Image (cartoon, helix red, strand yellow):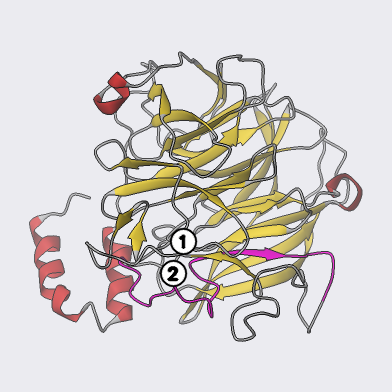
Amino acid sequence: MNLNKFSAIILLLALPFLSSCEGLRATLIGWFSPEYQPEGTVTDLKPEFSGPDSQRKKIDIQLAEMASGYPQITEMVFHPSSDRFLFLAQKNGKLTLLDLKSGKGKEILKLQVPVVSEQGLLGIALHPDFLRNGFVFLNYSVEDGDRRFSRVSRWTMDNPGELNSPSRLRAEKVFMEVDQPYQNHNAGRLDFGPDGMLYIGWGDGGWRDDPEEHGQNPLTLLGSMLRIDVDKEEDGKAYSVPKDNPYHTGKPNWAREVWAIGLRNPWKYSFDPKGRLIVADVGQNKWEEVTFVDKGDNLGWNTMEANHCFDPEEGCNRAGLRTPIFEYGHDEGQSITGGYVYLGNRTELKGKYIFGDFVKGRIWAIDLPEGNEMVEAYALGKWPLLIATFARDGSGEVYVADFASGKIYRIL
Protein backbone atom coordinates (compact mmCIF):
# COMPACT_ATOMS: atom_id res chain seq x y z
CA MET A 1 0.00 0.00 0.00
CA ASN A 2 1.45 3.37 -1.04
CA LEU A 3 0.43 6.22 1.24
CA ASN A 4 0.84 9.84 0.27
CA LYS A 5 2.26 12.24 2.83
CA PHE A 6 -1.13 13.51 3.96
CA SER A 7 -2.54 10.03 4.44
CA ALA A 8 0.53 8.96 6.37
CA ILE A 9 0.14 11.91 8.76
CA ILE A 10 -3.49 11.01 9.39
CA LEU A 11 -2.54 7.41 10.06
CA LEU A 12 0.19 8.41 12.51
CA LEU A 13 -2.19 10.69 14.38
CA ALA A 14 -4.77 7.93 14.56
CA LEU A 15 -2.49 5.17 15.82
CA PRO A 16 -2.77 6.01 19.56
CA PHE A 17 -6.53 5.52 19.38
CA LEU A 18 -6.66 2.32 17.34
CA SER A 19 -6.63 -0.09 20.27
CA SER A 20 -9.90 1.34 21.62
CA CYS A 21 -11.80 2.64 18.60
CA GLU A 22 -13.34 0.02 16.34
CA GLY A 23 -15.07 2.67 14.23
CA LEU A 24 -11.81 4.46 13.50
CA ARG A 25 -10.13 1.22 12.56
CA ALA A 26 -12.95 0.41 10.14
CA THR A 27 -12.62 3.89 8.62
CA LEU A 28 -8.90 3.40 8.11
CA ILE A 29 -9.48 0.03 6.44
CA GLY A 30 -11.80 1.80 4.02
CA TRP A 31 -9.25 4.52 3.34
CA PHE A 32 -6.14 2.43 3.02
CA SER A 33 -7.21 -0.92 1.63
CA PRO A 34 -4.51 -1.74 -0.94
CA GLU A 35 -5.35 -1.87 -4.62
CA TYR A 36 -2.96 -4.49 -5.92
CA GLN A 37 -1.66 -4.59 -9.47
CA PRO A 38 -0.15 -7.63 -11.21
CA GLU A 39 3.61 -7.71 -11.44
CA GLY A 40 4.25 -7.77 -15.18
CA THR A 41 1.97 -7.56 -18.21
CA VAL A 42 -0.67 -10.08 -19.20
CA THR A 43 0.35 -9.72 -22.85
CA ASP A 44 3.64 -11.39 -21.90
CA LEU A 45 2.14 -14.49 -20.34
CA LYS A 46 5.27 -16.41 -19.51
CA PRO A 47 6.32 -17.95 -16.19
CA GLU A 48 9.18 -16.54 -14.15
CA PHE A 49 11.17 -18.65 -11.69
CA SER A 50 12.81 -16.41 -9.13
CA GLY A 51 13.69 -16.44 -5.46
CA PRO A 52 13.21 -19.82 -3.77
CA ASP A 53 11.32 -21.03 -6.88
CA SER A 54 14.60 -21.02 -8.79
CA GLN A 55 15.85 -23.77 -6.47
CA ARG A 56 12.67 -25.87 -6.45
CA LYS A 57 11.74 -28.66 -8.81
CA LYS A 58 9.79 -27.18 -11.71
CA ILE A 59 6.75 -28.32 -13.65
CA ASP A 60 6.31 -26.51 -16.95
CA ILE A 61 2.76 -25.34 -17.56
CA GLN A 62 0.98 -23.00 -19.92
CA LEU A 63 -2.07 -20.85 -19.24
CA ALA A 64 -4.67 -20.95 -22.00
CA GLU A 65 -7.13 -18.06 -21.97
CA MET A 66 -10.71 -19.35 -21.87
CA ALA A 67 -12.76 -16.20 -21.22
CA SER A 68 -12.40 -12.49 -20.42
CA GLY A 69 -14.42 -9.50 -19.31
CA TYR A 70 -15.18 -10.45 -15.70
CA PRO A 71 -13.01 -8.25 -13.44
CA GLN A 72 -12.77 -8.94 -9.72
CA ILE A 73 -13.73 -12.59 -9.90
CA THR A 74 -14.08 -14.07 -6.44
CA GLU A 75 -15.30 -17.61 -7.16
CA MET A 76 -15.84 -20.09 -10.00
CA VAL A 77 -17.86 -23.31 -9.79
CA PHE A 78 -18.47 -25.63 -12.72
CA HIS A 79 -21.97 -26.79 -13.55
CA PRO A 80 -22.17 -30.45 -12.46
CA SER A 81 -23.34 -31.68 -15.87
CA SER A 82 -20.93 -29.76 -18.13
CA ASP A 83 -17.25 -28.80 -18.31
CA ARG A 84 -18.28 -26.00 -20.64
CA PHE A 85 -20.41 -23.95 -18.24
CA LEU A 86 -19.44 -22.48 -14.91
CA PHE A 87 -20.97 -20.18 -12.34
CA LEU A 88 -18.92 -17.05 -11.94
CA ALA A 89 -19.13 -14.70 -8.93
CA GLN A 90 -17.76 -11.14 -8.99
CA LYS A 91 -16.99 -8.93 -6.04
CA ASN A 92 -19.55 -6.34 -7.20
CA GLY A 93 -22.44 -8.75 -6.63
CA LYS A 94 -22.88 -10.21 -10.11
CA LEU A 95 -23.45 -13.94 -10.56
CA THR A 96 -23.16 -15.24 -14.12
CA LEU A 97 -23.51 -18.61 -15.82
CA LEU A 98 -20.65 -18.49 -18.33
CA ASP A 99 -20.29 -20.54 -21.51
CA LEU A 100 -16.55 -21.10 -21.93
CA LYS A 101 -16.96 -22.19 -25.54
CA SER A 102 -18.60 -18.98 -26.72
CA GLY A 103 -17.18 -16.73 -24.00
CA LYS A 104 -20.67 -15.39 -23.37
CA GLY A 105 -22.48 -15.40 -20.06
CA LYS A 106 -25.95 -14.75 -18.71
CA GLU A 107 -26.36 -12.78 -15.52
CA ILE A 108 -28.58 -14.81 -13.18
CA LEU A 109 -28.38 -12.55 -10.12
CA LYS A 110 -27.22 -9.05 -9.17
CA LEU A 111 -26.86 -8.27 -5.49
CA GLN A 112 -26.32 -4.82 -4.02
CA VAL A 113 -23.28 -5.41 -1.86
CA PRO A 114 -20.65 -3.23 -0.16
CA VAL A 115 -17.25 -3.65 -1.77
CA VAL A 116 -14.90 -1.84 0.62
CA SER A 117 -11.75 -3.87 1.29
CA GLU A 118 -12.65 -7.58 1.29
CA GLN A 119 -16.44 -7.24 1.18
CA GLY A 120 -18.70 -8.27 -1.69
CA LEU A 121 -20.12 -11.41 -3.25
CA LEU A 122 -17.52 -13.88 -2.05
CA GLY A 123 -18.70 -17.48 -2.22
CA ILE A 124 -20.93 -19.87 -4.12
CA ALA A 125 -21.68 -23.56 -3.65
CA LEU A 126 -24.12 -25.85 -5.45
CA HIS A 127 -26.18 -28.27 -3.40
CA PRO A 128 -25.07 -31.91 -3.91
CA ASP A 129 -28.51 -32.56 -5.41
CA PHE A 130 -28.47 -29.36 -7.46
CA LEU A 131 -29.65 -30.95 -10.70
CA ARG A 132 -32.87 -31.95 -8.95
CA ASN A 133 -33.54 -29.07 -6.55
CA GLY A 134 -31.68 -26.15 -8.18
CA PHE A 135 -30.32 -24.90 -4.84
CA VAL A 136 -27.47 -22.39 -4.99
CA PHE A 137 -25.80 -21.17 -1.78
CA LEU A 138 -24.14 -17.75 -1.66
CA ASN A 139 -21.97 -15.92 0.85
CA TYR A 140 -22.02 -12.13 0.56
CA SER A 141 -21.52 -8.94 2.56
CA VAL A 142 -24.34 -6.75 3.85
CA GLU A 143 -24.39 -3.31 5.47
CA ASP A 144 -27.64 -2.32 7.16
CA GLY A 145 -27.33 0.98 8.95
CA ASP A 146 -24.54 0.63 11.48
CA ARG A 147 -24.56 -3.15 11.24
CA ARG A 148 -21.97 -4.90 9.05
CA PHE A 149 -22.37 -8.65 8.51
CA SER A 150 -21.94 -11.63 6.22
CA ARG A 151 -24.95 -13.57 4.99
CA VAL A 152 -25.14 -17.17 3.83
CA SER A 153 -28.36 -17.82 1.94
CA ARG A 154 -29.93 -20.30 -0.42
CA TRP A 155 -31.39 -19.38 -3.80
CA THR A 156 -33.32 -21.48 -6.30
CA MET A 157 -32.75 -21.94 -10.03
CA ASP A 158 -35.95 -23.23 -11.62
CA ASN A 159 -34.32 -25.05 -14.53
CA PRO A 160 -30.95 -26.25 -13.20
CA GLY A 161 -30.35 -28.59 -16.12
CA GLU A 162 -30.98 -25.94 -18.78
CA LEU A 163 -27.60 -24.48 -19.72
CA ASN A 164 -28.30 -22.30 -22.74
CA SER A 165 -31.15 -20.30 -21.19
CA PRO A 166 -30.75 -20.46 -17.40
CA SER A 167 -33.34 -18.85 -15.17
CA ARG A 168 -32.49 -16.07 -12.75
CA LEU A 169 -32.15 -17.06 -9.13
CA ARG A 170 -35.16 -16.48 -6.91
CA ALA A 171 -36.63 -17.20 -3.48
CA GLU A 172 -33.77 -16.33 -1.16
CA LYS A 173 -33.77 -18.20 2.15
CA VAL A 174 -31.33 -16.88 4.74
CA PHE A 175 -29.40 -19.57 6.61
CA MET A 176 -26.86 -17.59 8.61
CA GLU A 177 -25.81 -14.03 9.37
CA VAL A 178 -22.55 -13.30 11.16
CA ASP A 179 -21.59 -9.82 12.33
CA GLN A 180 -18.25 -8.60 10.98
CA PRO A 181 -16.32 -6.09 13.11
CA TYR A 182 -14.29 -4.91 10.11
CA GLN A 183 -14.38 -5.02 6.32
CA ASN A 184 -11.41 -7.38 6.01
CA HIS A 185 -10.81 -11.04 6.90
CA ASN A 186 -14.39 -11.91 5.97
CA ALA A 187 -13.19 -15.06 4.12
CA GLY A 188 -16.28 -16.09 2.13
CA ARG A 189 -15.87 -19.55 0.64
CA LEU A 190 -18.58 -22.21 0.82
CA ASP A 191 -18.11 -25.88 -0.05
CA PHE A 192 -20.07 -29.06 0.39
CA GLY A 193 -17.98 -31.92 1.69
CA PRO A 194 -18.18 -35.55 0.60
CA ASP A 195 -20.39 -36.06 3.67
CA GLY A 196 -23.02 -33.75 2.18
CA MET A 197 -22.51 -31.12 4.89
CA LEU A 198 -21.90 -27.44 4.11
CA TYR A 199 -18.53 -26.13 5.31
CA ILE A 200 -18.29 -22.38 5.96
CA GLY A 201 -14.92 -20.77 6.67
CA TRP A 202 -14.94 -17.48 8.59
CA GLY A 203 -11.98 -15.19 9.15
CA ASP A 204 -11.18 -13.67 12.52
CA GLY A 205 -13.25 -10.55 11.80
CA GLY A 206 -10.47 -8.30 10.66
CA TRP A 207 -8.24 -5.36 11.35
CA ARG A 208 -4.91 -7.03 12.33
CA ASP A 209 -3.52 -9.14 15.18
CA ASP A 210 -7.04 -10.50 15.90
CA PRO A 211 -7.83 -7.66 18.36
CA GLU A 212 -11.02 -9.29 19.63
CA GLU A 213 -9.31 -12.70 20.02
CA HIS A 214 -11.81 -14.59 17.92
CA GLY A 215 -9.29 -17.15 16.66
CA GLN A 216 -8.94 -18.91 20.01
CA ASN A 217 -12.51 -18.31 21.16
CA PRO A 218 -14.80 -21.32 20.51
CA LEU A 219 -17.81 -19.30 21.65
CA THR A 220 -17.79 -17.31 18.42
CA LEU A 221 -18.26 -18.38 14.81
CA LEU A 222 -15.47 -16.07 13.64
CA GLY A 223 -11.98 -17.48 13.16
CA SER A 224 -13.54 -20.90 12.64
CA MET A 225 -14.52 -23.55 10.14
CA LEU A 226 -18.19 -24.44 10.48
CA ARG A 227 -20.05 -27.58 9.43
CA ILE A 228 -23.84 -27.59 9.13
CA ASP A 229 -26.63 -29.69 7.62
CA VAL A 230 -28.67 -27.54 5.25
CA ASP A 231 -31.26 -30.26 4.60
CA LYS A 232 -32.72 -30.22 8.12
CA GLU A 233 -34.09 -27.43 10.29
CA GLU A 234 -33.52 -27.33 14.03
CA ASP A 235 -34.10 -25.00 16.98
CA GLY A 236 -35.74 -22.34 14.83
CA LYS A 237 -32.80 -22.18 12.43
CA ALA A 238 -32.82 -22.95 8.71
CA TYR A 239 -30.17 -25.63 9.29
CA SER A 240 -29.26 -28.25 11.85
CA VAL A 241 -25.96 -29.05 13.52
CA PRO A 242 -24.65 -32.56 12.82
CA LYS A 243 -24.49 -34.56 16.02
CA ASP A 244 -20.93 -35.64 15.28
CA ASN A 245 -19.65 -32.05 15.29
CA PRO A 246 -16.93 -31.81 17.95
CA TYR A 247 -18.75 -29.40 20.27
CA HIS A 248 -22.30 -30.64 19.77
CA THR A 249 -22.62 -31.99 23.31
CA GLY A 250 -19.15 -32.24 24.89
CA LYS A 251 -18.69 -28.47 25.18
CA PRO A 252 -22.18 -27.09 25.88
CA ASN A 253 -21.10 -23.43 25.93
CA TRP A 254 -19.14 -23.60 22.69
CA ALA A 255 -20.65 -22.85 19.27
CA ARG A 256 -22.03 -26.16 18.07
CA GLU A 257 -21.60 -25.26 14.40
CA VAL A 258 -17.82 -25.10 14.81
CA TRP A 259 -15.73 -27.84 13.19
CA ALA A 260 -12.31 -26.27 13.87
CA ILE A 261 -10.90 -23.05 15.36
CA GLY A 262 -7.74 -20.93 15.13
CA LEU A 263 -8.14 -19.64 11.56
CA ARG A 264 -7.13 -16.16 10.44
CA ASN A 265 -8.69 -15.83 6.99
CA PRO A 266 -9.44 -19.11 5.13
CA TRP A 267 -9.99 -17.50 1.74
CA LYS A 268 -10.10 -20.82 -0.15
CA TYR A 269 -10.33 -24.50 0.74
CA SER A 270 -11.33 -27.78 -0.89
CA PHE A 271 -11.43 -31.53 -0.32
CA ASP A 272 -8.93 -34.06 -1.65
CA PRO A 273 -9.96 -37.43 -3.16
CA LYS A 274 -9.63 -39.00 0.30
CA GLY A 275 -12.14 -36.53 1.72
CA ARG A 276 -9.57 -34.51 3.66
CA LEU A 277 -10.27 -30.80 4.02
CA ILE A 278 -7.36 -28.67 2.77
CA VAL A 279 -7.39 -25.06 3.95
CA ALA A 280 -5.22 -22.21 2.64
CA ASP A 281 -5.16 -19.72 5.51
CA VAL A 282 -3.96 -16.20 4.75
CA GLY A 283 -1.21 -14.99 7.08
CA GLN A 284 -0.38 -11.59 8.46
CA ASN A 285 3.23 -10.56 8.99
CA LYS A 286 5.43 -13.30 7.62
CA TRP A 287 3.82 -16.65 6.72
CA GLU A 288 1.13 -18.24 4.52
CA GLU A 289 0.02 -21.82 5.10
CA VAL A 290 -1.65 -24.94 3.69
CA THR A 291 -3.15 -27.13 6.40
CA PHE A 292 -5.27 -30.26 6.72
CA VAL A 293 -8.27 -29.45 8.92
CA ASP A 294 -10.10 -32.18 10.79
CA LYS A 295 -12.76 -32.42 13.46
CA GLY A 296 -11.92 -30.36 16.53
CA ASP A 297 -8.63 -29.00 15.19
CA ASN A 298 -7.06 -25.76 16.38
CA LEU A 299 -4.85 -24.11 13.73
CA GLY A 300 -3.34 -21.81 16.31
CA TRP A 301 -4.11 -18.25 15.21
CA ASN A 302 -3.27 -15.85 16.80
CA THR A 303 -0.90 -17.81 19.06
CA MET A 304 0.82 -18.98 15.89
CA GLU A 305 1.13 -17.84 12.29
CA ALA A 306 1.59 -21.01 10.24
CA ASN A 307 4.33 -22.96 12.06
CA HIS A 308 5.77 -19.95 13.91
CA CYS A 309 5.00 -18.21 17.18
CA PHE A 310 3.04 -14.98 16.74
CA ASP A 311 1.83 -13.92 20.19
CA PRO A 312 4.17 -14.21 21.98
CA GLU A 313 6.85 -14.08 19.29
CA GLU A 314 8.89 -16.73 21.10
CA GLY A 315 8.06 -19.59 23.43
CA CYS A 316 4.37 -19.85 22.55
CA ASN A 317 2.37 -22.85 23.75
CA ARG A 318 2.06 -25.20 20.76
CA ALA A 319 0.32 -28.00 22.64
CA GLY A 320 -2.64 -29.41 20.74
CA LEU A 321 -2.24 -27.12 17.72
CA ARG A 322 -2.53 -28.37 14.16
CA THR A 323 0.56 -27.51 12.13
CA PRO A 324 0.64 -26.87 8.37
CA ILE A 325 1.88 -29.24 5.68
CA PHE A 326 3.33 -26.35 3.69
CA GLU A 327 4.20 -22.73 4.36
CA TYR A 328 5.94 -19.91 2.53
CA GLY A 329 7.25 -16.56 3.65
CA HIS A 330 6.37 -13.06 2.54
CA ASP A 331 9.54 -12.91 0.51
CA GLU A 332 7.61 -15.12 -1.97
CA GLY A 333 4.02 -13.91 -1.61
CA GLN A 334 1.58 -12.11 0.66
CA SER A 335 -1.84 -13.73 0.35
CA ILE A 336 -2.37 -17.41 -0.35
CA THR A 337 -5.17 -18.61 -2.63
CA GLY A 338 -6.09 -22.24 -2.16
CA GLY A 339 -6.90 -24.48 -5.09
CA TYR A 340 -7.60 -28.12 -5.90
CA VAL A 341 -6.02 -31.51 -6.29
CA TYR A 342 -5.37 -31.94 -10.01
CA LEU A 343 -7.17 -34.96 -11.48
CA GLY A 344 -6.77 -34.22 -15.19
CA ASN A 345 -4.57 -35.53 -17.99
CA ARG A 346 -1.18 -33.98 -17.13
CA THR A 347 0.83 -36.87 -15.68
CA GLU A 348 3.28 -34.57 -13.88
CA LEU A 349 0.41 -32.85 -12.04
CA LYS A 350 -1.83 -35.83 -11.35
CA GLY A 351 -2.75 -36.05 -7.67
CA LYS A 352 -0.93 -32.85 -6.72
CA TYR A 353 -2.60 -29.98 -4.88
CA ILE A 354 -2.35 -26.75 -6.90
CA PHE A 355 -2.51 -23.33 -5.24
CA GLY A 356 -1.11 -19.82 -5.66
CA ASP A 357 -0.50 -16.37 -4.25
CA PHE A 358 -2.89 -13.50 -4.97
CA VAL A 359 -0.35 -10.68 -4.76
CA LYS A 360 2.72 -12.18 -6.42
CA GLY A 361 1.04 -14.43 -8.96
CA ARG A 362 3.06 -17.51 -8.09
CA ILE A 363 1.60 -20.97 -8.64
CA TRP A 364 2.81 -24.08 -6.81
CA ALA A 365 1.90 -27.75 -6.49
CA ILE A 366 2.56 -30.14 -3.64
CA ASP A 367 2.26 -33.87 -3.10
CA LEU A 368 -0.13 -34.34 -0.21
CA PRO A 369 1.40 -36.40 2.61
CA GLU A 370 -0.23 -39.44 4.17
CA GLY A 371 0.14 -37.89 7.61
CA ASN A 372 0.73 -34.31 8.68
CA GLU A 373 4.38 -33.91 7.78
CA MET A 374 5.72 -30.82 5.99
CA VAL A 375 6.32 -31.19 2.24
CA GLU A 376 8.27 -29.39 -0.48
CA ALA A 377 6.63 -27.53 -3.35
CA TYR A 378 7.03 -27.74 -7.10
CA ALA A 379 7.32 -24.36 -8.82
CA LEU A 380 4.81 -23.73 -11.63
CA GLY A 381 6.00 -20.20 -12.24
CA LYS A 382 5.31 -16.60 -11.31
CA TRP A 383 2.66 -15.08 -13.58
CA PRO A 384 1.46 -11.48 -14.13
CA LEU A 385 -1.87 -12.23 -12.46
CA LEU A 386 -3.75 -11.48 -9.26
CA ILE A 387 -4.76 -15.06 -8.51
CA ALA A 388 -8.15 -14.77 -6.83
CA THR A 389 -9.51 -18.27 -7.19
CA PHE A 390 -9.16 -21.65 -8.86
CA ALA A 391 -11.77 -24.06 -10.21
CA ARG A 392 -11.77 -27.71 -11.25
CA ASP A 393 -14.02 -29.16 -13.93
CA GLY A 394 -15.58 -32.60 -14.03
CA SER A 395 -12.58 -33.97 -15.94
CA GLY A 396 -10.21 -32.84 -13.19
CA GLU A 397 -8.64 -29.97 -15.14
CA VAL A 398 -7.81 -26.84 -13.12
CA TYR A 399 -8.55 -23.22 -14.01
CA VAL A 400 -7.32 -19.94 -12.54
CA ALA A 401 -8.93 -16.49 -12.49
CA ASP A 402 -7.15 -13.14 -12.68
CA PHE A 403 -8.83 -10.62 -10.39
CA ALA A 404 -7.30 -7.68 -12.25
CA SER A 405 -8.05 -8.41 -15.90
CA GLY A 406 -11.15 -10.55 -15.43
CA LYS A 407 -9.64 -13.34 -17.52
CA ILE A 408 -9.99 -17.06 -16.88
CA TYR A 409 -7.22 -19.47 -17.82
CA ARG A 410 -6.94 -23.22 -17.99
CA ILE A 411 -3.73 -24.82 -16.80
CA LEU A 412 -2.19 -26.91 -19.60
Main SS class of the magenta portion in the image? loop
Is the residue marked by circle 1 packed among few (<14), some (14-19), or many (20+) residues within 10 Å? many
**x, y percent for residue 283:** 36, 53
Residue at 61%, 73% in the rendered image:
177
Check if residue 345 falls in the magenta segment. no
Q: Is residue 88 visible?
A: yes
Numbered badge on residue 139: none
Q: Amino acid at mark 1?
A: Leu
Numbered badge on residue 263: 1
Q: Is label 1 in a helix, a strand or a loop?
A: loop
Tag 2 residue: 215
Q: Quadrant of residue 351?
A: top right
The residue range painted magenta reads 208-233
Q: Quadrant of residue 77?
A: top right
Give the side of residue 392 with respect to residue 146, left or right.
right
Is the residue marked by circle 2 packed among few (<14), some (14-19), or many (20+) residues within 10 Å? many
